[in-house]
Amino acid sequence: MKAINHLLLILLVLIGFDRTSDAQTLIPRVGATFSTLTLDFDAEPFTQNDELKMKSGFVVGLGIEFILSEQLVVLPELTFIQKGFRSESNYSEPGYEYMGKTNLTVNYLELPVLVKYMITNGSTRFFVMAGPSLGFGLGGKLKDETSGKFENDPDANYVNKNDYDVSFDGLPQGYEGPLYEYIDNRLDIGMQAGVGALIADKIIVEVRYGLAFTKLYDDRSFTSFGQANEARNRVIQFSVGVPLHVFAR
């Protein structure tokens, strides 16, 4: 909770500063996220076909523009953003087929501070942006499904579906269930970069890519997808925002 309070305090300080500076614009935005993990694939695969996929989520946030010049803008934000991944695996041998699906969603409260460079003027202003970000894990869900089919014994076929809450307390000693929902590091420190356009000073469309520097897991291996201690969040964001000139003089 202290980290959340610190993020909120930073945003309030920025808003207070905003009212006494040349910055005049609040930017609420909403959009979709597509996320996965970076992993070390040196480990031996468990199944004949393991596939790590992107999962969808959403992002919603509020930013404040600090106008430094005609081309240069600083944009701190406070956002709620979903990250995670999906995976599918299968294994087969004569008379038996196994399939598994995993869907991990982790919710973060995130504070990116981006520098925007406005490339063009006119009714449509294109820009590029980049900067650091600090995320605080709030919680999440892991959905895990496994199934098995026996060619010569249909009565032994099975389907198991389980939901687990994400925990940031680390992996319990001796735990033998799914591993992904026990995340060691609550803080997600990284960077974001992207491009966008301000259209007619009424709507902003953006595409961002975010990469974490911090790892989700410490000293742990996932047999299926490699070394978990190298797992970092990767996120693509597509969003739309509306500039609100609420502090205009």
Image (cartoon, grey):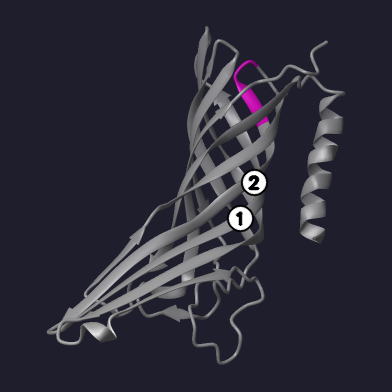
Identified at 64% across, 46% down, the residue is: 80
Identified at 57% across, 59% down, the residue is: 106
Q: Secondary structure at mark 1?
A: strand
Report the residue marked by disc 1. Answer: 107
Q: Residues within 10 Å of mark 1 (few under 14, many from 20)?
A: many
Q: Secondary structure at mark 2?
A: strand
Whether residue 157 appears in magenta in the rendering, the answer is no
Q: Pick the residue in front: 233 or 144.
A: 144
Task: Left or right? Give the position of 150 relative to 168.
Answer: left
Q: How many labels were placed on the picture?
A: 2
Magenta region: 70-74
Estimate the x, y position of residue 172 in percent, counting from the top left: 61, 85
Task: Left or right? Give the position of 110 relative to 87.
Answer: right
Task: Say which amino acid is labelled 1.
Answer: Asn
Task: Left or right? Give the position of 234 relative to 30.
Answer: left
Marks 1,2: beta carbons within 8 A: yes
Q: Which mark is residue 80?
A: 2
Of mark 1 and mark 2, the one earlier in the sequence is 2
User: Which image quadrant is residue 50 in?
Assistant: bottom left
Task: Say which amino acid is labelled 2.
Answer: Phe
CA separation in Å, label 1 and label 2 = 7 Å
Q: Residues within 10 Å of mark 2 (few under 14, many from 20)?
A: some
Whether residue 71 appears in magenta in the rendering, the answer is yes
Estimate the x, y position of residue 216 in percent, counting from the top left: 55, 67
